[in-house]
Amino acid sequence: MGIEIIFRIAAIGILASVVSSVLKQSGKDELATFVSLSAVIISLLLVLDMVADLFSTVRNLFSLY
């Protein structure tokens, strides 16, 4: 799960930048901004899931409820 998440976030970033640049060149700047924002939100959700797993592991490690 370590390097896999980095590749997923990188793929999301590359895909979003390509789509965003194509949309900007076609004159749809608002839609390009929306694509970039959605890519950031998806990446943050992936990281948030990892942080939740980390807190769960710490909680189980120290037997906290």
Image (cartoon, rainbow, N blue to C red):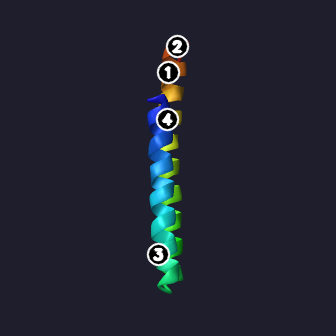
- Secondary structure at numbered mark 4: helix
Judging depth in this view, the residue of 60 and 40 nearest the camera is: 40
Q: Amino acid at mark 2?
A: Leu
**Residue with the mark numbered 2:** 61
**Residue with the mark numbered 4:** 50
Marked residue nearer the N-terminal end (3 or 1): 3
**Residue with the mark numbered 3:** 22
Marked residue nearer the N-terminal end (3 or 2): 3
- Secondary structure at numbered mark 3: helix
Q: Position of residue 53 (x, y in %)?
A: 47, 29
Disc 3/disc 1 C-alpha distance (Å): 42 Å
Disc 2/disc 4 C-alpha distance (Å): 16 Å
**Residue with the mark numbered 1:** 57
Q: Amino acid at mark 4?
A: Met
Marked residue nearer the N-terminal end (2 or 4): 4
- Secondary structure at numbered mark 2: helix
**Which label sits in the foreground, 3 or 2?**
3
Check if mark 4's residue and mark 3's residue have beta carbons within 8 Å: no
Q: Residues within 10 Å of mark 1 (few under 14, many from 20)?
A: few
- Secondary structure at numbered mark 1: helix
11 relative position to 55: left or right:
left
Marked residue nearer the N-terminal end (4 or 3): 3
Check if mark 1's residue and mark 2's residue have beta carbons within 8 Å: yes
At 52% across and 49% down in the image, what residue appears? 44
Q: Position of residue 32 (x, y in %)?
A: 50, 74
**Which label sits in the foreground, 2 or 4?**
4
Check if mark 3's residue and mark 1's residue have beta carbons within 8 Å: no
Above or below — where is 33 with respect to 38?
below
Position of the N terminus, as image quadrant, is top left
